[in-house]
Amino acid sequence: MTEAKLEAWLDEKRVFPPSESFVANANAKPSIYDEAKADPEAWWRKQAERLVWDKKPTSTLEWDLPNAKWFSDGTLNASVNCVDRHVAEGRGDKVAYYWVADADGESRTITYSELQKLVAKTANALVELGVKKGDRVAIYMPMIPEAVIAMLAVVRLGAAHSVVFGGFSADALSSRILDSDCRFVITADGAFRRGAPSPLKSAVDEALQSCPDVKTVLVVRRTGGDVHWVEGRDYWWHDVVDRQSDQHTPEFFPAEHTLFLMYTSGTTAKPKGIFHTTAGYLTQCAATYHYIFDVKPETDVLWTAADIGWITGHSYIVYGPLVLGATQIMYEGLPDSGGRDRWWRIVEQFKATVLYTAPTTIRTLMKWGDELPKSHDLSSLRLLGTVGEPINPEAWMWYRENVGRNNCPIVDTWWQTETGAIMITPLPGITATKPGAAMTPFPGISADVVDNEGNSVGNGEGGYLVITAPWPSMTRGIYGDPARFKSTYWDRFPGMYFAGDGAKRDEDGDLWLLGRIDDVMNISGHRLSTTEVEHALVGHPAVAEAAVVGATDDTTGQAIVAFVTLKLSAEDATKDQSHLVEELRQHVARVISPIAKPRQIILTPDLPKTRSGKIMRRLLRDVAENRSLGDVTTLMDPTVVNMISGLMQNEGTSED
Ligand code: WT7
């Protein structure tokens, strides 16, 4: 689409009213906004009735900023809520997951009663291996059913899982294991990517060299082939789990019992162990899934195309959908595993009704052309969702026209690892949608856009997104670091949660999210901090100093651009350095993850600094995006910037 056409859309302020067919049957009725507004706590209390409790709570919210407790005198078991209760209520034969393998066309159907047995066996196996209430268990797995089963078995015992995305490096895994003192790891021998096996267990072996307290590793066989084996530490899943009883009597835990940890990048080099507790989290996951995705458990086949290694997978592949007893598609592969029309074949084969994915993937699918979705029957789809980064209107329109055939509402859902569940979103059947806008806080959520002083901005103005009242699925903190929790989120604007995102309120009062305003980058919907990548670069022996910025990228939203000065002898400096650039990119992939590999590395003799010695990232961002440079008078040496711009123009962009 041309710039002009895009502008025309924006000028038109295109609005899509809810379709008639949706209004009639929507789970969400307009009255729920009023109901929640009149008494938010009563509203959430009602949402908590979706859970099965051992002891029903009498309390709702206890709030002592920044510490919230929800439903605190209730007791429950998360895995019972996700699995056993559906079997007990007569829905055991219902499909929980259609699991679809990476490239070979294999699939596996798992009903709720099968899931119950698998979770019970796994829980029994974990008991045998010594997992106890209060422990932390690291899960480092591909998108296979055992990942979900492992999560549910861990929480069934009152332990907490810490799922580490399978794309992370051994270093990233070990630092997460150490930070939360995990004693157990559940993994697989390897994962499939576009039909080819790639090892996972070897990264665990490497990570554990610096984690002496991990005494037990449970390994699923997925790819076959040889793996390094430590007798007495490593156990095959099929040896230990398969022989267990499929009966397991659950214990019940307090509502505020820790359910899981999820590491996410902040503005420093050290990722934060965001932790969530049980009842409030489950309540909001289920309520949002029910209303936003309009779930009809009897007939829907829902597909959240995300990885279990991120919060989206936790909340909308595992906990939210399972509490509702939904039927889902779980897909192991990449969008082009087995061909670029793979997604559309899956939608067609399983008659998916709801698809939830990230803008970066939508843009990739869009690049592959309109013909692919057109050549498949996508008529089962009735609702589309997007999450992870601001969606550009062009991608939104493509999604609507080519995937939704102009008759599926699109829900653009804003939330974070820290918020646990969706916070700002249209509701299908109620909210008229605008391409690129997340629109409105979910019922029971209070959000605002404020200026530098914390005052609410008017319509047509921009500022910082804040949440002004506690919500059930909010993080209960950063593992082991309550001071950092308070200072990161609660000190910027007194009494409010500071999300780190810029936002604007349009003339109608609707919300548009504008991206991070801090040093957090969003690469294909993955969060990474500039400092984290700088840290990795400086760890390389040839690097003296590094400055990293996120630059706008057509496909990945943002891409990493690194400016690096080298520790070089005069002799080295005259040599061709192109091999070094590639080596540095690989180095970052090794230290953090391939997703953190810089798109571009500019080797420069100097970095622009203020007179006080701070690197001027804003300037570098302008350079990286070819913007005009604005005021450089505070620079120690203004010529550095011109020099870097020059270097930038001579550099090719490496892509893979
Ligand atoms: C950051 C949180 C929530 C699951 C995936 C990401 C950005 C998220 C949107 C959206 C604009 C969005 C924000 C936020 N973000 N959804 N619909 N529109 N921006 O979770 O890794 O914790 O990242 O993702 O910048 O702060 P996360």
Image (spheres, rainbow, N blue to C red):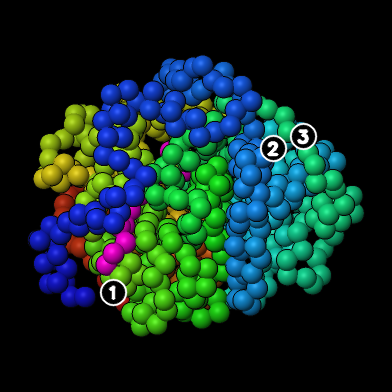
Mark 2 is surrounded, within 10 Å at the Cα level, by few (under 14), some (14 to 19) or many (20 or more) other residues, namely many
Q: Residue at x 55, y 79 (%)?
A: 338
Seen from this angle, which residue lies furthest right? 231
Q: Is residue 284 left or right of residue 184?
A: left
Instruction: Tell me the magenta residue range.
Output: 406-419
Main SS class of the magenta portion in the image: loop
Whether 40 is drawn above or below 186: the answer is: above
Q: Is residue 251 left or right of residue 342?
A: right
The image's mark for residue 249 is 3
Q: Are marks 2 and 1 in contact (CB under 8 Å)?
A: no
**SS class of the residue under badge 1?**
helix
Q: Residue 371: x, y in percent?
A: 36, 83
Residue labelled with disc 2: 156
Residue labelled with disc 1: 649
* Residue type at numbered disc 3: Thr
Q: Which numbered mark, 2 or 1, is in the foreground of this view? A: 2
Q: Residue 358: x, y in percent?
A: 40, 60
Q: Which numbered mark, 1 or 3, is in the foreground of this view? A: 3
